[in-house]
Amino acid sequence: DIFDPPILSPTIGTTWTVKTTQTVSWDTSNPPDLITGRNHSSIRLIKGGRQLPVVLADEFDILLGKIEVEVPWVTEGDDYAIILFGDSGNWSKTFTIKGGPSY
């Protein structure tokens, strides 16, 4: 079955700094009994509505509810989001990453 858990963190107002460890969390309170791809989840980085070739976490159990990720060296911006892939994609609210190069 499809499981599309809402992302709790990061959210609007969140600021990450490059090369720090941050926690991504999502709500696992109402999962279906059988989840397609349960242990093959991944978290990807989005900038300006476009998916970047950056995988923050891969091959984990979506029922964990949270996972720590290292913020990659990316340009500063306030238009980042993450997408949680389990058996469907779920986008976070936009947030800021600072500490990288600004262009």
Image (spheres, helix red, strand yellow):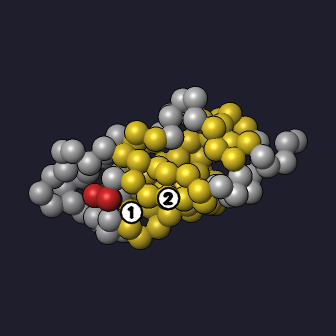
Residue type marked 1:
Ser
> In what quadrant of the picture does the C terminus appear?
top right
Question: What is the secondary structure assignment of the residue under circle 2?
Answer: strand
Question: What is the secondary structure assignment of the residue under circle 1?
Answer: strand
Query: On the rendered structure, is 93 left or right of 90?
Result: right
* Residue farthest to the top, as pictured: 13
Residue density around tag 2, few if under 14, some if 14–19, many if 20 or more, within 10 Å: few
Query: On the rendered structure, is 68 left or right of 26?
Result: right
Write down the residue under mark 1.
Answer: 41
Residues 17 and 44: in front is 17
Query: Looking at the image, is mark 1 or mark 2 earlier in the sequence?
Result: 1
Residue density around tag 1, few if under 14, some if 14–19, many if 20 or more, within 10 Å: some
Write down the residue under mark 2.
Answer: 68
Whether residue 49 is visible to the viewer of this picture, yes or no, is no
Residue type marked 2:
Glu
Query: On the rendered structure, is 90 left or right of 81?
Result: left
* Residue farthest to the right, as pictured: 103
x and y percentages locating residue 83 in the rendered image: 48, 48
